[in-house]
Every structure is written in structure tokens, then in C-alpha cells.
Image (spheres, coloured by chain):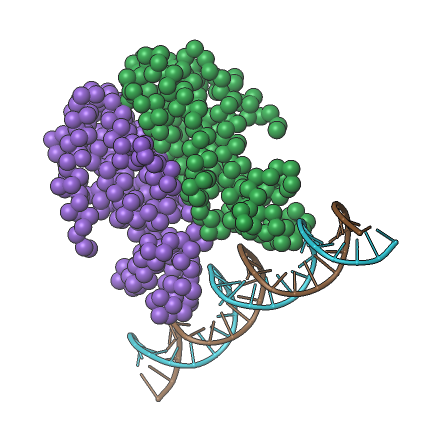
Chain colours: A green, B purple, C brown, D cyan
Amino acid sequence: MSPRRSDPTARPTLVDIAARLLAEEGPQALSARRIASEVGTSTMALYTHFNGMRGLVRAMVHEGFTRLQHYFTGVEFSDDPVSDLALLGRAYRCNALANPHLYAVMFGGSSLAGFSLDEEDRQYGRYTLAGVAECAARCIEAGRFHAQDAELVAHQMWSAVHGLVVLELGGYLTEPWDADRLLEAQLVGLMVGVGDLRESATGSVAESARRLQEELVPVADDSA
Amino acid sequence: MSPRRSDPTARPTLVDIAARLLAEEGPQALSARRIASEVGTSTMALYTHFNGMRGLVRAMVHEGFTRLQHYFTGVEFSDDPVSDLALLGRAYRCNALANPHLYAVMFGGSSLAGFSLDEEDRQYGRYTLAGVAECAARCIEAGRFHAQDAELVAHQMWSAVHGLVVLELGGYLTEPWDADRLLEAQLVGLMVGVGDLRESATGSVAESARRLQEELVPVADDSA
DNA sequence: AGTGAAGCAAAACGCCGTTATGGCAGAGCC
DNA sequence: GGCTCTGCCATAACGGCGTTTTGCTTCACT
């Protein structure tokens, strides 16, 4: 009945090749026939293992959230939780820029092969962001934020950075209001908006920019 | 060479029917054959008038921005520019909720028929948001915002609300952190983040919620 | 009336996702 | 060893897709 969503031992190659195809040549290269010929089998393999094209796209979405999770776990908690939160935002963007097409499929855009997420997929996605809420809670505990609801703060963070990334991937952000500059303003604005002092927020965001190079880039580079 | 992008006198029916099809049955109903049979012609009409499927999707994107513009012009400037700005954010969301599939195509999601926007399309989209920057400038002039760059504020506003809407349309925002609640927090957070006093921001955002019913809903309902 | 261009119907081409059929290899059992 | 049974996949077909070609019709202009 249900497609074998993520059985890494059985056919890791198929979803990997599909992900590579999507990343390198975009959505239109991701056809059942093309994948099959790339793997060296017939299209039937795709049906026995993934119950069709939709099942494979679903498996790829899960893979996408796993990669996002990987970026998130790369940020270590410091004694400045606001800096941690800003770094999580940067990590979110890094993942999206590293896997732009996959990211587009994950968040409802790119209706690939008539694929649409179901509630289980979305719950899977929400769970990935649990760490952000945890970090927001630490900001509140530290007295940096006046906001009370850590989950709400996490969702504000999510939608703000997500919106920036979608516009960036869509090519809407160009000089002089490019994504890099907008991100800095957006992060500081977010922290101040939920209660941090502007001076503290500016410092923490700047600190997170420093940590991006030192902590996160090595994590992104290591080969799984 | 170039497809007749928006020639309202020649074939208004074709793009209208296509838009209706997209709105009522979603992206997979939007096929050249289906549209042709709905209009009562052959698929060739689609090529003589729009240079193929991509050209028609492009025309629909322009139509989408026109609708967004229509929502924007529905908000009248009051003597509280922050309330105006918040209302523009609400108008943006209203348009997206009224035309969800079209909205998805406009912003890079939903790679319909291999369609992708070109720089002209994006410039068309950016121009639509000029009014937001204008309103942000009025907030700055009124001394409500500490931020200096009105365009930057407009972009922050855009990406924050855009992100919220994309997550909402993707089904990611559920109780108790639903889109309605998140929008209120996001709007207040934005205003405070760019320099408004929390008390003033809360008042202006609440005022904009009142105006949404009085000003904008009538505009949305009037038939063109 | 003659001529030109424009618009569209019909059919075909090469893709697509999907399904039905059938062959083949290996496991379990006698 | 032989037998069956099951999982896996190659092949081929089906319907639908966007697009192109061809040619007919219609209509404006001289």
C-alpha cells in the first residue's frame, strides 16, 4: 500500500541520482524515463520501490528535510542564544541555497509531477523546526526577548527567513536590496521586534555572521 | 517574435478561462488541450495568440500582478502611515488567498509547463511593490521608524508577509500557530523592528485590522 | 475579381506517467 | 535435485501532454 518512503538500505542510489538530477538540471529533467536511464534500469524499478513518481518525489522531500536538519545540528549552542537563533536563520538559508530545487519542492512550490504534500510530510517538516523553538525559548529565559511564546517567535523567524529565501531563489532580490543585505536587516529587525534591545541584537547578529564561517561552513562541506 | 503578452482586446477570453481553470482545478488542469476544448477551439489558437503554453502562463502572471495591484490601490492613505503599511501587508495576503494557484506561479513556485520568469516579469512584479516603499517613506517622514531606507523596509515587509503566505498556502501553519495569529505578531514585530514604539505599533496594526473590513473587503468584492 | 495575410482545424511527432504482461532469479521446502 | 512461489524488472502498450506541420478558410484591401 504505502510506498517505501525512506529505505536507505534498499535503493539509496535511485533517490540519490534523482536528487542529483534535480539539483543539476532542474525540475524538467526529473522524469521517470530519464531517471531510469540514468540508473540503468527500466521505469518499473521506480514503481516497485516508490510506488510511482509521486512516491519518489515524496522520498526526496524527506531527504530535503534531513539535509535541513543536518544544517541545523551544525549550529552549536553558545552562551548567546540570540546569536544562536540568528545562526539558525543563516543555516536555513544556506540549506536552501545549497539545494534550491529540492527546497522549492519541499515548500509547496514546484508542483512536480502533480506531487503535493500530505499532512504527514508537513508534520515531518514542522518537526525539523523544533530546534528553532527550543533556541527561542532560551532567548526568552535569558531575558533577551519580551515575547512569551517561543513557538510563535520561531514561526515568525521561519516565515521571515523563508520569505526572504523564496524571493531570493525567485530572482526578485537584486542590488541594492539584495538578499545578503536584506538578511542582516531582517535578522536584527526580528530580534528587536520580539523584544531584544537594538544594540544587543545588532551585536548578536554580527556575531552570528562570524560564526557562520567558523562553525557552519565546515559542517556544510563535510561529505556524508 | 515576442508573444502578445497582454492584448486585452484580442483574446481576453482565453487567458480568463485559463485563469479560471487554474483557480478552480489547480495546476494539473491547466493543459493546452484542456484550455482549447474549454474555449471551443484547437490548441493552435494558443500558439497564434500567446506563442505557446509558456507565453500564456506569462500572460497569467502579469494578470496576477494586476490583481495584486488592484488590492493595493484599494488601501487609501490615512494620517497613520504605519496603519497604512500594515493594511498593505494584509492586502497582499488577501490577494494571495484569493488567487492561491496564480500566486504560486508568480513567485517561482509551481514550475508550470516548464515556465520560468524572465527579468522583465520580475521587474513587473517589483514595480507592483513601489507603493509599499512609498508608504514606508511616509512612516519614516512621520518619525515613526528609525530605519532610514524606505525600500529596505518595504523589502523586509514583503519577505516577511510573503513567507507567511507561502507557508500558509503550503499548509504548514496550523493551530495554535495559525496564519491569522502569526500575521498579527509579524506585523507588530516588523514595525517595532524598524523603529516604531511597541505601543504605537500595536495600535496601528489593530487599526489596520479594523480597516481591512471597512475598506478592503468592499474593494475585493466589486466586480471588474 | 484578385491577392495577401491571418487564424485555426487536423494530424502527426516525441515526450510524459502509468499499467499489463511475462520472463527470470533465488528462497523455502519436499 | 526438483518444485513452487515470490519479488524484481524489461518490454511494450495506452492515454495525455506540448509542439509543429500542413493546408484550408476567411476576410481586408486594391
Q: Nearer the viewer, residue B216 or A25?
A: B216
Q: How many marks?
A: 0
**Left of A165 or right of it: where is B157?**
left
Question: Could you tell me which residue is drawn at 17 percent across and 45 percent down?
Answer: B217
Residue B157 can be seen in this image: no
**Left of C7 or right of it: where is B148?**
left
Can you tell which quarter of the image residue C9 is in?
Answer: bottom left
Question: Could you tell me which residue is drawn at 20 percent across and 25 percent down?
Answer: B201
**Left of B132 or right of it: where is B40?**
right
Q: Nearer the viewer, residue D10 or A190?
A: D10
Residue at the extreme left: B79
Give the image location of residue B50, x and y in percent.
38, 60
Q: Nearer the viewer, residue B121 or A158?
A: A158
* Whether residue C2 is situated above or below residue A73 in the rendered picture: below
Give the image location of residue B195, x and y in percent.
24, 21
Question: Could you tell me which residue is drawn at 48 percent across and 25 percent down?
Answer: A72
Give the image location of residue B63, x and y in percent.
30, 52
Give the image location of residue A16, x and y in percent.
60, 40
Residue A74 can be seen in this image: yes
Q: Quadrant of the C terminus of chain A?
A: top right
Question: Could you tell me which residue is drawn at 62 percent across and 53 percent down?
Answer: A43
